[in-house]
Amino acid sequence: MSEYIITTEKGKWEVICGLEIHCQIISQSKIFSGASTEFGDDVNENVSFVDAGMPGMLPTLNKECVHQAVKTGLGLNAVINKYSEFSRKNYFYADLPQGYQITQFQYPIVGEGAIDIDLPDGTTKTIRIERMHIEQDAGKSIHDMSPTKSFIDLNRAGVGLMEIVTKPDFRSPDEAGAFLRKLRSILRYLGTCDGNMDEGSMRCDVNVSVRPYGSDELRTRCEMKNVNSVKFVMQAIESEAKRHVETYEADGDIAQETRQFDPATQTTKVMRKKEFAHDYRYFPEPDLPPLVLSDEFINKIKSELVELPDAKKTRFIKELGLTAYDASVICENKETADFFEKAAKGHDAKKVANWLMGDFFAMLNEKKLELKDSPVSAENLGKLVELITSNVINGKTAKDVFAIMAETGENPDKIVEEKGLKQVTDTSAIEKLIDDLLASAADNVAAYRGGKVGLFGWFVGQVMKQSQGKANPQVVNELLKKKLG
Amino acid sequence: MTDLTDLTISESLKKLKAKEISPVELTTAYIEKMKNNDKYNAYVTTTEDLALAQAKEAEKRYANGTNRPLEGIALGIKDLFCTKGVRTTACSHIIDNFVPQYESTVTQHLLDDGALFLGKLNLDEFAMGGSNETSCFGPVVNPWSKETKLVAGGSSGGSAAAVAAKMCAAATGTDTGGSIREPAAFCGVTGIKPTYGRCSRYGIVAFASSLDQAGPIAKDVTDCAILLNSMAGYDAKDSTSSKVDVPDFTSFIGKDIKGLKVGIPQEYRPDGLNKEISDYWDKAAQILKDAGAEIVSVSLPHTKYALPTYYVIAPAEASSNLARYDGVRYGNRKEGNGLDELYINTRTEGFGKEVKRRILIGTYVLSAGYYDAYYLKAQKVRRLIKNDFDEAFKKCDILLTPTSPIEPFAIGDKKMLENPINMYLNDVFTVSVNLAGLPAMSLPIGLSQNGLPFGMQLIGKAFDEETIFKTAYQLERGANFVRM
Amino acid sequence: MAVDNDTVRRIAFLSRLKVEPDKLEETKQEFNKILAWVEELGEVNTDNVEPLVSVNNESLTLREDDVTAGHMSEAVLANAPAKEFGYFVVPKVVE
């Protein structure tokens, strides 16, 4: 792709960016306690004595969270570490009841991995994953309910998180955006995280630095915490990189600090300077012995793994003949891919893809419906395409039939049958229509034969009109050409 | 009629089953003793009414034959065990108003077996101390004190004193660096710290998670076995609790020890060891020899480093475990301007001096730049200390040592107070056991010239409490110690 | 590694404890006494020694993913020094 280079009067700069993504694990109960992970319950209702950090309470590890983490690690093409340890990250905060977060530090459950991202210009790039570990989420502090107090709800405290850390492989906002979309797609395929950034179930920290283009130096990086949409992540990288360039070009220095991105102004501002940096005093969690996974445990998860977007995309291109672009759009979302596969079964897959990405999505958009609520079923979309490819109806009729399907949810075969929309391919019937037309429009026939070939379309239109749109346009074309000489 | 509180648990159970005595009578006798002996400051909370109600229930059960293994036995509970609906303070101001809404696993086991609780027993604040002087409720007085008030040892000082002064049939204790064994020795009673993982830590206020272990303090070895039967067992709520089968510990009582190899670790006999203690150590070895055991000399070369190792690891874990006491969800709060000030005011006011000292040390040894030099180093030495025991146990089945290098000292002793390290040194014979996760028992061997009790310690292999009980019972018989 | 007054202040803040200025010197000295004592560990050769993390050799047991606790906010809040509308309350946190 075209490189992302910040060019100023003084020089050219390159952006270096890495991401840390916190993903809430889908599980019934919390990672270290038996309280529910349900979102939206009453205040402090999904809280156990463990979550509230009561004296003498101890953590117990949820098997499902480990399962989900291994699954995710496999989805990131990463090394699964059979030995991992939990550690305590110590700091004081109102929504951190124990005064420490149980996380993984030196020995994470998932090691290095990599995923490929598709860039807008059609190329792909590999982004390396540094590691992924599991940990507990904090509770929620609510600051806007009173001018003098903050309110603490611990419902979220202890929900399982996966923290995915990438290598600093991003060189443009587009790459980071493509990565986040790809990651979200993988997590949703796996069913390990719902990936909703706006609800906070996926949260992103962005590390940015810049360097003179062509150099390999490493300059000070700044971290922007909790950027909560793909768009904002891209904007944050852009604005932060710009700030670094401007600072360096004005002979200034960038301080290592934590910053916050403000979407309203599209700028970042400092949250925490280095001198206030935490000293987290990590040490092995003495309440939890090391986690040792058996080959059996890992292999079972491997064997149950669903087909992931890349594999599906490759298959759709190779076996179903889709273009790379269509395949990647359809595979981004598992529900879409499943719907497509069902619709395309036994039919012309490329045509099904066109219909899906064209009229079908337009219809859903217009009706503001989710795929799962579509009035047109996958089977019926397939049948509609079949009616076209087998010349039972023409493309124009198909659009009308589709409109009826979108209203009624009816089977297209039935609609075509009942409304008598089958196209006429019987040459004798069409021939009769043409003969009648040519007889009644002698002037135009003469004009055409005299060189006004542009009139051909008018003849086609007239025949189609007479057939109430049911004539096969190809047959009409051929016969007209013959008869007009 | 004899004083019912003189009876051991095994004797009481016999009489209760034979209906020679009633649970209400027995409980009333203990309550009487609690009142008469409140000068020892052993209890910080009493629950006589609850206990009497439970005693009445026990009476019914004995009548209808549904009595459970500890039916009607009156216990005292170290105030580090969370007891549902009964104030639990860890003897710290910071939570001196805390009423748990849950029961610790160990006390639940005891309740399920029919025991009843007379109240909560004094301890060093958060179990940090060796003399019970750091308690926010003031020190426990050793019942053996003559003119001068002596310490009962710590941290389970209330437990040991209450058992010695017959203010309960037995008590629960916890042991992180000697907190069951040292006060047991100072008060002339018997206590066992089982193998790490034997008893669930669920519901016990944590001091140092990788070292803490609960155990009983009782009048004799047999009673310890009876109680440990109830207290021990795997608990899914504590990920460090062990799945190793729990045997009937009472079945080892009275078993002979012929051919048993008893190891004497040479490093536990430094120059200048108190002569009386040294003599009693020899006497204990002789008793075991007379019972058929063989005495062998063994070496634990890293013994010297056990205390420094302990005083890195235990404060480190404590600094983290005590972070939750912040005045937000429970306990006392001292308001401040902003969250950090609230934390600082709450914790500065709520914690006592020794606890604060250990939190600071613990924070330091874990902080950036010092972790490797202190904490990691200590963990490595901890491995070497454990390896020492593994080697020693290739040559012997059990180790015999004194429990403490000194006899009970005066409350407010200047030497102990002016330098915390002097106090820490009292744990010299006990901390290695916690670092290695091994079981160990202290039982009284005799009195000093000052008329104060000395304790001997038996250290077993991991999960081999069997050998400890067998050996301890023989030693107890041979020592013929006269209880208070 | 003797600590200075700044270190004591920093460690005190990390611990959320206050060391009064007039106690700073005393605290520092006590700190250094204890540190000097534990530094005896430096004598021990620990090359190639694995740190002992857990004396328990059994590996971590995993819990089934069942909801077994919750819906007891009253009990959770029972000991709270300040609570309103079912929340724990702290002084306003300015972020």
Image (cartoon, rainbow, N blue to C red):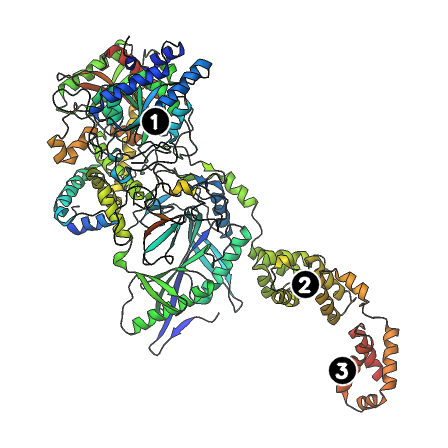
Q: Quadrant of residue C57?
A: top left
The answer to whether residue A39 is above or below residue A459 is above
Q: Identify the element where label 3 is drawn.
A: helix
Q: Residue at x 51, y 50 (%)?
A: A192
| Residue closer to the observer: A467 or B35 | B35
| Residue B198 seen by the camera | no
The quarter of the picture where the N terminus of chain B appears is: top left
> How far across and down, in percent of the image, does residue B30 sit?
29, 19
The quarter of the picture where the C terminus of chain B appears is: top left
Q: Are marks 2 and 1 in contact (CB under 8 Å)?
A: no
The answer to whether residue B140 is above or below residue A380 is above
Q: Is residue A283 left or right of residue B265?
A: right
How many marks can you see? 3
The numbered mark at residue A115 is: none
What subunit carries mark 1? B
Q: Residue at x 76, y 82 (%)?
A: A457
Label 2 Cα crowd, 10 Å radius (few <14 / some 14-19 / many 20+): many
Q: Identify the element where label 2 is drawn.
A: helix
The numbered mark at residue A352 is: 2
| Dot 2 amino acid type | Val
Q: Quadrant of residue B401?
A: top left
> How far across and down, in percent of the image, does residue B144 sit?
18, 19
| Dot 3 amino acid type | Gly
| Dot 1 amino acid type | Thr
Q: CA distance from mark 3 to mark 2?
A: 29 Å
Mark nearer the N terminus (3 vs 2): 2
Q: Are marks 3 and 2 in contact (CB under 8 Å)?
A: no
> How far across and down, in percent of the image, does residue A49 sit?
40, 40
The numbered mark at residue A457 is: 3
Q: Residue at x 23, y 47 (%)?
A: B345
Q: Quadrant of residue B10?
A: top left
The numbered mark at residue B195 is: 1
